[in-house]
Amino acid sequence: MNKSQGPRSLAAVPRRKVAIAGIAESRFGEVPDATAWQLHQEGAALALADAGVEPSDVDGLFSCGADIMHPLILGEYLGLRPGYVDGTQVGGSSWEFFVHHAVGAIESGLCDVALLNYATTSRSDVKRRIRSSNVAIDARGPAQFESAYGHTVIGRHAMAATRHMYEFGTTSEQLAEIAVQTRFNASHNPLAMYRDPITVADVLASREICSPLHMLDCCIRSDGGGAVVLVAEDRVADLPKKPVWILGAAEATSHHTMSEWEDFTESPAKRSAERAFGMAGVKPDDIDVLQVYDSFTITVLLTLEALGFCAKGEGGAFVEGGRLRLDGSLPTNTDGGGLSSNHPGMRGLFLIIEAARQLRGEAAGRQVEDASVAAVNGTGGWFSSTGTLVLGVD
Amino acid sequence: MPQLPRTATWHLPVPDLETSEYWDATAQSRLLIKHCDACGRDFFYPRSHCPRCWSSSTSWKEASGDGVVYTFTIVRQNDLPPFKERLPYVVSIVELAEGVRMTSNVEGCAPEDVRCGMAVRVAFREEQRDEGSVFLPVFRPA
């Protein structure tokens, strides 16, 4: 029986620190022989085992997907009846939002063990022809002022790249550097979908999808999922693994309709990072390893600027010279990211998993030496939402 | 199993209580934006209140139709109808002379000739559907 669902006195619960206790990916890449629900459970079972907690200990469920009432369907599928549920759906950054929300819930005693759980079979679904590679968003409400113009998800991001190039002279070669260095990192991850090294020339020679973005500037499409388990500090003594503390967490929201984005060269991550870094009391210089949403190379570039690793407009020069590689001064997307490792659709969960893995020292073959502070930045929609986390180990 | 859409009208605007005047005007080759009578600012896309000061005292205002390309992309891949047949095409954020921005297409020139800062002027593209034509504001080099 799950005792934590019983009545409690909030006054009796001091504000508690929150740690990542369990992390796991399900199978990912191409998984034609499992449903998305299966992959949810597979990731959840592995992450709970990693945390040394039982499914019946879970009293908080955080998840989103394409379905209405997704957390209810998932809870039912898993056989859980959590007393705290969050189904926030703000795109790929939803997972960083969930951590932000879970920190609030756990520290104030609303739940003790939070399960963040995600999976899709989006790659296999395209092959089965039950979904398109492009997302059809209908033309009601605000979308009636966009949909008729054939505005794709890639195109929305490409327009940020066009404007950044226009204002700051950023080049396609500089954007390509991000894809090349991420692939270098992927080459050290045996589970990454794409591991063969690529060059800037390869990126520029790949098909242009939406100018100025080429195919190799775009994330891959994979199946897969995973889970993250967060617990209150009073459970930390029982954990089989080193706790990874949430030192800072914040979220920021922006436009949904593209024409409402004030500045196509500035990610809302500027706001979420300022607050998350402030909460943690860290500066960009303190970050040992970085995981940022890389739906497209331009997403990484705007995020690096917004997080303060370089000044606005200087992202192009910053990414030259291998800085983002495992052996660079700012190891970024160390598992190969969405550009090379996996991307089932809303990838923010994998950023948290890889950051925690690096801080635990478990990233065999791609371990960043002495990593003790990590930053994570999820970006959702088309620079529509961002969630920034700062993680650390004792 | 569900199928991909076969009809090519899912993308066309569905006018509603807040926007029917806008689409009625485009059918007469007029581009309307919204004006806030309380704070004096123009805004787009149109809604019944001012998104800045929340006044519900707003009115329609005819735009000059002049603008510049704020940013754009040449779309070369889109597997959804009807866009697949139209590739490549330019999607742009156009900043109107009145200072508001809208999403649109830039037509009437080679996609490769479109530039940020380029002067453009509104035109209206007719698209057919069962309920009758709809006229979409698009932009051409000025």
Image (spheres, coloured by chain):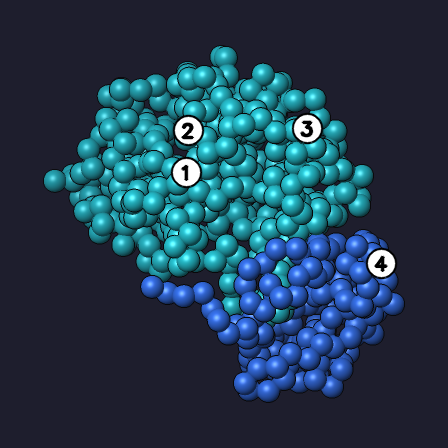
Q: Name the residue under label 3.
A: A319
Q: Nearer the viewer, residue B67 or A153?
A: A153
Amino acid type indicated by mark 4: Met
**Residue A273 shows in the view:** yes
| Marks 3 and 2 close (CB-CB < 8 Å) | no
The crowd level at tag 2 (other Cα within 10 Å; few <14, some 14-19, many 20+) is some
Q: Are marks 3 and 4 on the same chain?
A: no
Q: Residue A191, which numbered label?
A: 2
Percent coordinates x, y for residue B45 in the rendering: 65, 68
Amino acid type indicated by mark 1: Gly
Circle 3 chain:
A
Q: Residue A29, which numbered label?
A: 1
Q: Could you say whether the residue bearing mark 3 is in a helix, strand or loop?
A: loop
Give the number of the mark in front: 3 or 2: 2
Chain appearing in cyan on the rendered image: A
- Image height of A100 relative to A136, above or below: above
Percent coordinates x, y for residue A227 in the rendering: 34, 37
Circle 2 chain:
A
Chain appearing in blue on the rendered image: B
The crowd level at tag 1 (other Cα within 10 Å; few <14, some 14-19, many 20+) is many
The crowd level at tag 4 (other Cα within 10 Å; few <14, some 14-19, many 20+) is some
